[in-house]
Image (cartoon, coloured by chain):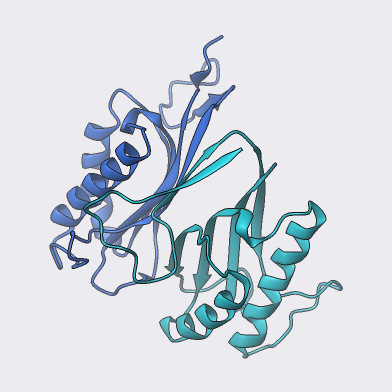
Amino acid sequence: METIRIRPKHFPVPVAPFSYAIKVIGGSFMFIPNQIPVDSRGQIVGKGDILSQATQVYENLKAILSERNVTFENIVKLTWYLTTRENWKPVVEVRNKYFKDKWPAATFVLLDRLSREDVLIELNAIAIIE
Amino acid sequence: MKNKEIVFPKGSNESSIFGIRVSQAREWLFIGGTVPRDANNVVVGKKDIQKQMTHVFDNLRDILLEGGFTMNDLVQLNVYLTDESHRPAYFELSRKIFLNNPVAQTVLVVRGLNDPDVLVEVDGTACIT
């Protein structure tokens, strides 16, 4: 299995931590649906607290990856959804604790609302598994 | 059976009802949010959806080429618009681009994207079988 981060030569080096695209040769995949900030009992955590909610979704993601013995380095695509641009910076702070380098191809989208009124962040991912 | 085929349900005349079956893919390309920025990282065509759509697809082509892919290798594409009124213009352009190579597209109108000046963004998946 091989992964290659793609950047056309005339494209600027990303100023934010992301990859324009990731090429994968071989391997198998895990498609992870939207994660919301619930704990293992299904209770929403950190109501009104974006830092707590962002941490919970990343912890949920980490638990899923760990189940197949892979890490955040194996994530090739990440899509995250917020309801206000104000929450972008705090979420990036949390994200940077989980991704050290090997940034995924990423998309950020602002929506009017998420799956539940008290949910401030959702994210989904594709990971490669050897 | 071909390694890539468009799947239409029998008896359906609706062109939007289809899937793309891929088997024995050798290479995949996962493409992140592609925006209408130029080589200086400046958003082009502010408030001009036509210019921005054209630039987004130019950037998408460049990313695919750099990875050894072409637009014909795209299988799935998400399109994020920030204004419902831009939808007809997008569909007119995409009909031309994907005329001979249908792609599983999802077009959404969202509240906003990473940069308030960006009117359209795409991400998606390509593969070579």
In the rendered structure, the answer to whether residue B100 lies left or right of residue A127 reads left
Q: Position of residue B84 (x, y in %)?
A: 30, 60
Q: Quadrant of the N terminus of chain B?
A: top right
Residue B71, placed above or below residue B107: above
Q: Position of residue B108 (x, y in %)?
A: 41, 55
In the rendered structure, the answer to whether residue B98 lies left or right of residue A61 reads left
Occupied quadrant, residue B34: bottom left
Color used for chain A? cyan
In the rendered structure, the answer to whether residue A48 lies left or right of residue A3 reads right
| Residue at image coords 25%, 49% | B59
Occupied quadrant, residue B96: top left
Occupied quadrant, residue B43: bottom left
Q: Position of residue B61 (x, y in %)?
A: 27, 40
Q: Residue furthest right?
A: A41
Residue B121, placed above or below residue B91: below
Letter of the chain in blue = B
In the image, B32 versus A70, the foreground residue is A70
Please tell me how many numbered marks the rendered image carries: 0
| Residue at image coords 49%, 19% | B5
